[in-house]
Amino acid sequence: MFQKVLIANRGEIAVRIIRACQELGVRTVAVYSDADRKALHVRYADEAYHIGPPPPGESYLRLDKLIDVALRAGADAVHPGYGFLAENATFARAVAEAGLIFIGPSPEAIALMGDKVAARKSAERAGVPLVPGTKGGLSDDELIEAAHRIGFPIMVKAAAGGGGKGMRIVRTPDELPRAIQAARREAKGAFGDDSVYIEKLIEGGRHIEIQILADEHGNVISLGERECSIQRRHQKLLEEAPSPFMDEDLRRRMSETAVALAREVEYANAGTIEFLVDRDKNFYFLEMNTRLQVEHPVTELVTGVDIVKEQLRIASGRRLRYKQEEVTMTGWAIEARITAEDPFNNFLPSVGVITRLQEPTGPGVRIESGVFEGFEVSLHYDPMIAKLVVYGETRGDAILRLRRALNEYRILGVKTNIPFHRRLVDNTNFIGGVYDTAFIENTPELLQPTSQKRGLEAAIAATLLMHQRRQKALVYVAGTDDATSRWRLAARMEALR
Amino acid sequence: MFQKVLIANRGEIAVRIIRACQELGVRTVAVYSDADRKALHVRYADEAYHIGPPPPGESYLRLDKLIDVALRAGADAVHPGYGFLAENATFARAVAEAGLIFIGPSPEAIALMGDKVAARKSAERAGVPLVPGTKGGLSDDELIEAAHRIGFPIMVKAAAGGGGKGMRIVRTPDELPRAIQAARREAKGAFGDDSVYIEKLIEGGRHIEIQILADEHGNVISLGERECSIQRRHQKLLEEAPSPFMDEDLRRRMSETAVALAREVEYANAGTIEFLVDRDKNFYFLEMNTRLQVEHPVTELVTGVDIVKEQLRIASGRRLRYKQEEVTMTGWAIEARITAEDPFNNFLPSVGVITRLQEPTGPGVRIESGVFEGFEVSLHYDPMIAKLVVYGETRGDAILRLRRALNEYRILGVKTNIPFHRRLVDNTNFIGGVYDTAFIENTPELLQPTSQKRGLEAAIAATLLMHQRRQKALVYVAGTDDATSRWRLAARMEALR
Amino acid sequence: MSTRYMTYVDGREEPVEIIIHVDGTVEVDGERVDVDLVHISDETIYSMLLANRSHEVFAEYQGEGEWILLVDGERHEVRVEDERMQRLRQFGGGTHGPVGDTSVDAPMPGLVVKVLVDVGDPVGENQPVVILEAMKMENELRAPVAGVIKAVRVQPGTAVNLGESLVIIGPPSEDT
Amino acid sequence: MSTRYMTYVDGREEPVEIIIHVDGTVEVDGERVDVDLVHISDETIYSMLLANRSHEVFAEYQGEGEWILLVDGERHEVRVEDERMQRLRQFGGGTHGPVGDTSVDAPMPGLVVKVLVDVGDPVGENQPVVILEAMKMENELRAPVAGVIKAVRVQPGTAVNLGESLVIIGPPSEDT
């Protein structure tokens, strides 16, 4: 095992990795920008080094500085977390060239999966289903023939395109010729190229991903799926494991496919293969994330495997400690991402100082937090300030526990998306497990601030506090301008109540 | 299921029960003494009622007041927690007579197990091993014959006695006649009665207990054992599940015995049978606790069963949801009781206000706390202010996680036993699982404050803060006596550093 | 002497009328409520028992009668208006500068030791107006607003009850 | 001007000598250390980087130079003595009342605006002695101890550096 690991990250994930290291007896090195001198990851690590100004480009993305600190501190390995340089093959290579171990897959695997076209080709070779479609440059007749083969509904897309231009949804064969013509005209106008292609339209699709672990000795296992369909503009808001949509057969098929892809690209360490799953339980490759995921805790809770510790063990050359048949999913876990965003105002980021913070605790509640009282939420970094993860025997238990924990959560100073989560856990479709990636979009009431209650409790509390404040403001103890006696008096008045 | 439950308790266990109720959709009623108006259980409950002054005899032990509140609030059941009235058959009966459900066993079972002699008789009938011994009133020859049958070492004890008077440890047969004579003389002198009896001496014994669940339909299961040998003056300090001393055969035998005793006394609800286990894995009945135990969370973590929720389900008449063969112990859990006691000063209770509190979080850490910043630790109640419970894949994982969590724990304002736990998790015998009930007594270094470190970090930090304080005291902003500007200036000075 | 507030929650137009009587009783929309609000820690955390219903309140004052509250974790923005602020709004004025009269009331029962102002005096905000002896301490009562003294209802030696009006401050004169 | 402290940890007899120089550098037992102590929240929580080693410090001042600290969760009782307190102890006196001289130093660079005392003046604790203009604000420097002014080293208009001694206060005269 390593002696000392540099964590090239910040926030809750840096804290998570530091804790895993501590629990393995590994010393930790944190890095921080000017904005993060007081951050939890700095305070929890054994050592901490300054690496530059707040903008990531001048600090957390500066591979030269990171490797310099790692060498100065005598670290023997680097954990990239997620985001920042976690999927940067150049960084992984630079770490290796500095004689250090990169806790993640090989630079080759990162590069391969980071290239969409190459990733699709690898997936194809490994027998991973891709969303059926054609290449560009076909004639109208060829497209029509292909559409019949693929089956409706389909999408006609501009080959050169992007941004919805030259895109048509076609539900019946008779609409197709006109749609192709229209798409071609639009594509020509927008991109100067009338080449279009056809892709199957996946309606009511779910975003489900498979967590895999692979060692450097050719062993690959699946830790099962995570359901990540609760998204808004492709940002995940809540994840669960297992997926309420899953059955044993689908899990086995998806797991085997994911493992096959990992083998195909000679993957080592933890990775995630994301799939789109349609209503008929067909699944299609989206992409592979060659790093630790934000939502890894839900898998940890249901499988009992500590994924970050496994990452460290794998990177130090050890063999996987689990065989596929030893991995079982027990109980149910849900993660709610807590962000400093206003759900009632288009998830506008809310910046400021967290003046009060009270996190939920108790049975089945796990908090992964990067914040504290006095923490300043800035625009430099991700608005995710914590993850609330709950575990229960059943999905119902987990949802009720999540509701209880959300009710205990107190954050003052910035607006958060907690009210959104509180509405979500009360939504009957969510409770029923009936949702797809369009759920948030199709459920506008989740984003409505209006509550039926009159807020009498709030009115009474605020009025009493206002009254008390007025009383206090009126009274000064004569003959002293000392602030303390003023408060002493106020306390006495309070005792009078 | 119930609509509304009154929790006839305070502190962490009241909070624990409130959370379980909330997660079952049951409304909660808290009660509080004058000392507890601000307590967490009052703030977390749906309703709260005042029941009297701080001394328990005038509040938490007043069954009349408790039942009155339950009726006024419209509760349909009462959960007694542990301590206070939890093992009071009169209370259980009074609750039933008021038309409410007592969440616990029948008054008869409580009374039976609360009577030591009756409890031993029940145990005997159920085939539960008792520490081998004789009754009083035998002749010397009869005693000597019995001693040979029981096997050495034995104890000679005064039948009338107590307090160690007339007590002799005898290791070999030839010492016995003289020991009996001496014991008789001492007993005669002390109690006017020279009757003595013999009991087997259990050396190096461990305190291991079996958690059982029984429903009102005759189903009884064991949730396995808890190891509770880390004790000081019969106060448990740390518990684990499983026991490092356990093997499958012993677990099965102890579980079957515990279940047999529960059946014998027609027990319903959660209960615990405590055993003394000797080095040769013989076990002997100590007592049965007819209530929820402090240390129930370790069993919850390894079995996945929420014992408090099961208590509610059982009391509402439901059948057990688990069959014995479905109960398995997975992973390892340890609970450290956090008390406001000074481990370096004979565990003297430390009273005062908790001025700062920062509880550990993250993977595998569960906090059951009854305190908060501003909480006043008083002498009226138990010094246990929280429980830190950790879960890991293996005992080693759990110990390392406990160490990590203890290192994150911050409590200012009162002294706590956290330094004791920090020493304990570093003790090689503890790490090796080699300990018995005499471990704390035999390991005085756990109670020594001396550390090898010079405390340079503390010296530097305190000196810098002292220096800053001196600087601040010197400077006032001229022309204003407003406290805020003074601090603004101080902040500016800090920025200069 | 009671104090009457109009309290607006989450931007609703219809206020809640809350009257706090000098004996500490509270009336909400004409109905007496049983409320116990205690301070837990900081300036922020409170526990409120409202007819034995338990609510945890986190409160931050934003100035100008505006509060941000978390009540059992739900965020509310609340504006509390006392009678002066209500008049202010009725006169269509801004929220700055006093319009109408303001009473300086006794915040506790006591004995008036000194009256520091006369009718017609201009006073600044926070300027001491009366010294009240109570609980063996001299307490300086200050003007909550700037204005002109319109009435002085007590003199040295007057024993006053909790909430009794001592001095009335009118709006500042035009030429100040 | 540096300040020298003797610091006693957990009742040990051997103190740690810590010198804080005006430029902010810190010397511990004669060795320069690289330390960065920042305040996190409240009056209590700090993060200390000591040669890049990270320590979380919770600190509560108990008065009289005594501190209770949690450093990475380990509790320490620390007594910090400055030179005046050390002299006090050497003279075998109690911990109250000044013995020896105390210097009022400039807590920041600035311009002396006013000197409020003359040599020979008795001063009380907290009595203003010098007004220093710095960062566009006038700052009143007060006597940290009661005593008699022994020396005045600056006059209005003097520009002073951080840590420069402005006024020396001697022990109070016998007859005061």
Image (cartoon, coloured by chain):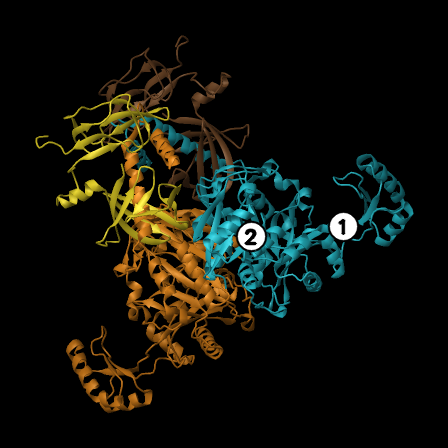
Chain colours: A cyan, B orange, C brown, D yellow
Instruction: Determine which residue is flagged by label 1.
Output: A202
SS type, badge 2: loop
- Say which mark, if any, is on residue B477: none
Q: What residue type is labelled 1?
A: Ile
Q: Is residue B218 visible?
A: no
Mark 2 lies on residue:
A81
Residue lying farthest right?
A141
Residue D67 showing in the rendered view: yes
Give the Cα distance between marks 2 and 1.
32 Å
Q: Quadrant of residue D61?
A: top left
Mark 1 burial class by Cα count in 10 Å: few <14, some 14-19, many 20+: many
- Which residue is drawn at the image coordinates 80% and 35% (left, top)? A190
Q: In which quarter of the image is residue B368?
A: bottom left
Q: Is residue B169 above or below residue B298?
A: below
Residue A25 percent coordinates (x, y) = 45, 61
**Mark 1 belongs to chain:** A
SS for tag 1? loop
Residue at image location 73% in from the left, 53% down from the top: A118
**Which residue is nearer to you in this view: B171 or B465?**
B465
> Of B289 and D98, which appears nearest the observer?
D98
**Does residue B4 lie above or below B432 as drawn?**
above
Q: Position of residue C1 (x, y in %)?
A: 36, 25
| Sequence-first tag of 2 and 1 | 2
**As shown in the figure, which amino acid type bears the numbered disc 2?**
Gly
* Viewer-nearest residue: D88 or A478: D88
